[in-house]
Amino acid sequence: SLGATQPNNAIKTMKQILSQSTLLTAASLVAVVTGDEYTHRYKKGDRVDLWVNKVGPYANPQEAYEYYTLPYCAPDTKHHPSNENGAFNALKAHSIGERLGGHALRHSGHDLLFADDKGGVLETCTTEKLTDEQTALFAKAANDQWFYQMYVDDLPVWGMVGEMLPDLDAAKSEKFGSDLSHLEEAVAKHAREGGALTPYVYTKRTLVVSYNDDRVVKVDLTSDPSSLKEVKKGMALTFELDIQWAKTNTPFHSRFDRYLDHAFFKHQIHWFSIFNSFMMVLFLMGLVALILLRTLRKDYARYALNHGPGGRDLEMAEQHNDHHGSDDEDEDVDENGKPLLDEGGRPSGPAGRMGVEDSGWKQVHGDVFRAPKFLPLLAAILGTGWQLVTLVMGVVLFAVAGPLHGEVHEERGEVLHAILVFYSLSSIVAGYASGSYFKLYFATTPAGRSKGGAAAGGTTQWQLTMGLTVLLLPTILVSILSVLNFIALCYQTIYYIPFLVLLKLFFLWVFVSVPLCILGTLLGRHAKLGGKKSDPFPCRVNAIPRPIPDDIQWYGVPANLIPFAGLLSFGSIFIELYYILTSLWNYKFYHVYGFLLGVYAILCLVVCMTTVIVVYFSLNSENYLWQWTAFYSGSSTALYVFLYSIYYFVFKTSMNGLVQTSFYFGYMLLISLGVGTLCGTLGHWSANKFVRTIFQNVKVD
């Protein structure tokens, strides 16, 4: 949390600022008394704050409201609203990550004293007579299975608001028990008989706080089924909280382990998915090796014959092939790609006499390094992709190093805070990648060839590339999040982003992200990309583009290959994707970041190798427009991720309503676009390395 890193003088300054209003004065008093909340150390008799966070339907994680949206009463303690210095409903200081994560902690008003030896403290309060609106709220909460969340010393606890039950008096007459098992039987029996259900709310809860020495290590909250009261208009409800303290030997460093579902995340299937993905990588590596070591080797051997001592030049070979054909060109080399020799040690067959015809990919040597269409847009997308590659790697490594700086799942908003930091700092990567890529290909455009165009049109193109790099990803984020924020604000959920948080994010973008992106673009523009050579490409680019053949085999059409490439990439991550989605939408703490790092590495390898295969078949069909093909090959993974998210929504969740549906598909659209940009960038990078490698090893006249 933010308070964990605040020095004492910052806290004093904050208190002076907050003291300007009555409500904020109460919040500052809380900060004074609970200074040990950030060190998690208490002395006997110190006050321990019980914070209430949210309440909402269990099936809809993002449809959450502030706790006192329900007509709960204020506890009858010194913090009651009627007391001048009470801390009831005082807002806890939140970091940007906490607010983005939908946390709105307010003081419950309950009075907890550390290691109280009184044997338990029972705090009570009674509501006013329920109005029609308040009765409807409790009834809705019971019918939709609303739950609430509280925090004690940064440890979360959950409880249900109420239940939908038949006549409770009749249930009590049938050996009413102390747990919910009997109630479930009564509900099932009543459902079979076709009776109506009535809303009930829990009015008594027991909070057991376990401590070891001077630290809180365990918190349990139970609701007493015998305290269920029917919700009726005009009745007053009395709520009770029984606070108990218990000693334990559980060490402080392992207090969060009980929240981690090890049986789920470290299941045998999870390990098997990693092994399965690893085997896929080995298969693809073998396939790529086959292309590089056998197919290309044969091509190189045939090209060498055209320039060797016993061969003719290329024009004579083409004239001979026009008269005699070249059906036997594959017979001029052995299985290892070496030319067959006659008794005199010279190459035998037609290849030895007059050379061979170039294969498809060599015929496009004059166009393969031609600038792609929409160069500024592609440069900006690739720059954003490298920023996402850096961001994801940085966040995952930060999470893996949790034992060194504190586990990220133990702090609210820690992951979101890390994402903001890495996004801002990695903006220089986006600028450099887009700037250097644009510089690399701009010289092959018509404007780049002409002296006047290079000066006039070049400046405009540079500005366009820089602007797209700066605005592309933020524009998409702001567009989608604005719609979600408007919906959350209309429904008054705690997942709306407050104005002050938006202002902080805007300043972070303007004063950190944008300058770094511009600086990176300038560095990329002045980077030396060709090494010692003036021309950064192995082959010269022809002035007139070569026509692309129309009559080619189906496996040479990029549109036929791209979906298969995306399917293989998705197949390497879909098991891990299930665990990630379950953590996002089903209240589980994701903590197996070592698995995530391994799957991320596997995804990178699979995307790179599948893209190389797609580009090779495209070049063999004399299609030299490989840049966008390579990007689409990798980014097609995003389509399968989004389709899987639809399947997960329909079959794995019980989400409903406009708020939750909008948040789910809005966030999944952002995740899919991010995955597509990241994978497309990796695919383009691998294809670029592949194309440069094969054309560097071929002598072109």
Image (spheres, rainbow, N blue to C red):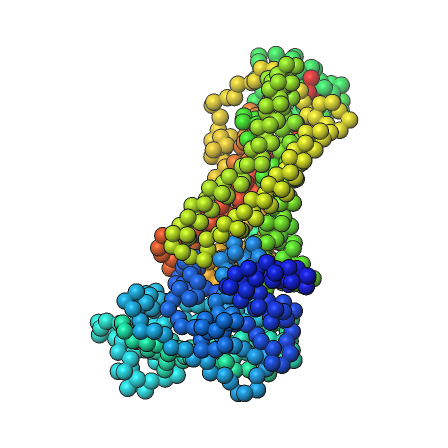
Q: Quadrant of residue 398?
A: bottom right
Tell which of 62 and 527 is nearer to you: 62
**Residue 221, x across and y down, in percent:** 48, 76
As drawn, 441 above or below 450: below
State the residue in front, 406 or 327.
Answer: 406
Q: Tell me the residue at 63%/48% (across/down).
A: 422
**Which image quadrant is residue 654 in?**
bottom left
Q: Is residue 369 left or right of residue 225?
A: right
Question: Relative to 365, is 687 above or below?
Answer: below
Is residue 301 in view from this perspective?
no
- The structure residue drawn at horizontal position 59% and vertical position 49%, both measured from the top left corner, is 420
Seen at 52% across and 71% down, the residue is 85
**Residue 434 shows up from this direction:** yes
273 w.r.t. 506: above or below? below
* Quadrant containing the N terminus in the rendered view: bottom right
Q: Is residue 41 left or right of residue 325?
A: right
Seen as rendered, the residue at the extreme left is 194
Quadrant in the picture for residue 71: bottom left
Q: How many marks?
A: 0
Residue 317 appears at what percent x and percent y? Answer: 64, 15
Q: Is residue 610 above or below residue 186?
A: above
Relative horizontal placement of residue 51, taking residue 359 as reference (left or right): left
Horizontal and vertical percent for residue 377?
A: 55, 31
Residue pictured at 54% horizontal, 37% vertical: 472
Q: Quadrant of the C terminus?
A: top right
Residue 234 locus on image (x, y percent) = 27, 73
